[in-house]
Amino acid sequence: MKIIIAIIVLLIVHLQYRIWLGDGSIAEIEAYQQRLDVLQKQVEEKRQRNEALYAEVLDLRKGQEAIEERARDELGMIKEDETFFHVLE
């Protein structure tokens, strides 16, 4: 009878060790969950950025207005026969 009790106690100790400290332990699972949450947040941010870039690409493909706007803002270009006024405040 003592042998059976000893085996049961050892089995319980072994299982408790695996739950708290072993491979796939509760602490390890929580660490993986936190890492997964961080990665999901990064993926969502990149998805939103990609959607914005895709919308910008579509806008540039469709019309000249977007191209002209970018040329004016980023390169400081003006059209022919157009006067540029720089207002200082």
Image: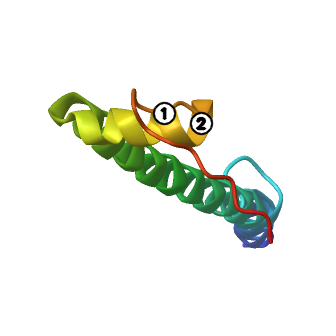
- Quarter of the figure that contains the C terminus: bottom right
| Image quarter of residue 60 | top left
Rendered residue at 59%/52% (across/down): 42
Rendered residue at 72%/73% (across/down): 1
Label 2 element class: helix
- Residue 23: numbered disc: none
Q: Is residue 85 above or below residue 70?
A: below
- Residue 74: numbered disc: 2
Q: Is residue 40 left or right of residue 1?
A: left
Residue at the farthest left position:
62
Q: In whole angstroms, how far apart are the C-alphas of marks 1 and 2?
A: 11 Å
Colour scheme shown: rainbow
Front in this rendered view, residue 52 or 27: 52
| Image quarter of residue 67 | top left
The amino acid marked with disc number 1 is: Ile
Location of mark 1 (residue):
78
Front in this rendered view, residue 14 or 25: 25
> In the image, which is nearer the foreground, mark 1 or mark 2?
1
